[in-house]
Structures are given as structure tokens and as C-alpha cells.
Amino acid sequence: MDVDLCAGGDSTRRKVDLAGVSDVTMDLVPLEMYDSARAKIAANLRWLFAKAYGIDHIPEDLRDPFYTDQYEQEHIKPPVIHLLLSCELYCRVCALILKTEQAASLQSHLSVIQALSRKGIYVVESDDTPVTDEDLACLPIKMVSVWT
């Protein structure tokens, strides 16, 4: 393993090459630069994409869901926003989770929420407020509703 972490005393991102593992690098971020909210969103999006498309078949433009604008601010890519608002991903994942004949009838955020609740899976925010189909279809996206 080749590790070069903060060797110069600065707090920048470093690449780590794992010996014996081909084509794998890990981006290590110093603790003072770590953004837990971004990490949570990234992990949840990766899980959603892996479930919807299969881990080896995630479309290239979705593999890194973020982009950086001219002001060095990170945002979620427009195609990802479009997918989240359209309910396509939620329908695909819910159909895989439920594995029933009702999965074919999933065509909206509301149908996904209802199908999950019939199976005892309740979609709620961190304060136990139910997430509505309007919450999942509004702009700007309420990431708390989507990923809590």
C-alpha cells in the first residue's frame, strides 16, 4: 500500500494506491475537509444506482453524481436531479425490493410510498414526519426527505 497523507503538512486530498489491487485508488480526505452531509448523499445515491441498475451497470454519467461549478461549489448533476424527480429510480428499486405482482403497477412517487407502507416500510423524515409524494417531486430537492 502506497500512502502519502499530509506529508507536506497541508490539508489536501490524497490518492492512495492499494498494492495487489488493480485499477483501484481511494481518495482520502483529511478530517477537517470531510463533509459528512455530502458523504451521506453520495453513499445513498450510489446505493440507489447500484440497486436500480446493478453494481456493474451504473451509467457512466451517474457514477460520480456531483459536479463543481465555476465558484468551486459542488452540486448534484442535472441528470441525477431529473431521475430523482421522475420517480424512475424509486420505482425500479421498489420493484426489486417487493418482488410481487404489484411491482408492475409502480408508476409514481405515491405508488412507491403506498407499496412500501403495505409491506411495513414507512417513508419518514428524521422527526418521523411522513414523506409525501410532493416532497419527492419538488424543486429544489429536499435531500433530507430523500435520504433520511
Image: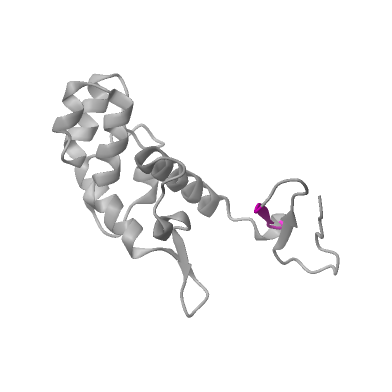
Q: Is 26 one of the magenta-colored residues?
A: yes
Q: Quadrant of residue 140?
A: bottom left
Of the pair 72 and 2, the residue shown nearer to us: 2
In the depicted structure, whether residue 49 falls above or below residue 17: above
Viewer-nearest residue: 2 or 94:
2
Q: Residue at x 50, y 45 (%)?
A: 43
Residue positioned 67% across, 54% down in the render: 25
- Report the number of discs: 0
Coloring scheme of the render? one colour
Residue 22 location (% of width, % of height): 68, 50
Q: Quadrant of residue 145?
A: top left
The residue depicted at 29 percent of the width and 32 percent of the height is 94
Q: Is residue 102 above or below residue 20?
A: above
Please name whichever residue, 68 or 15, is drawn nearer the observer in this view of the structure: 15
> In this view of the protein, can residue 148 be seen by the observer?
no
Residue 4 seen in this snapshot: yes
Where residue 18 sits: x, y (%)? 74, 49
Verify whether residue 87 appears in magenta. no
Q: Nearer the viewer, residue 146 or 99?
A: 99
Outermost residue, bottom direction? 70
Q: Quadrant of the C terminus?
A: top left
x and y percent of residue 48 in the render? 40, 42
Q: Residue at x 43, y 47 (%)?
A: 45
Q: Which residues are magenta?
A: 23-30
Quadrant location of residue 33?
bottom right
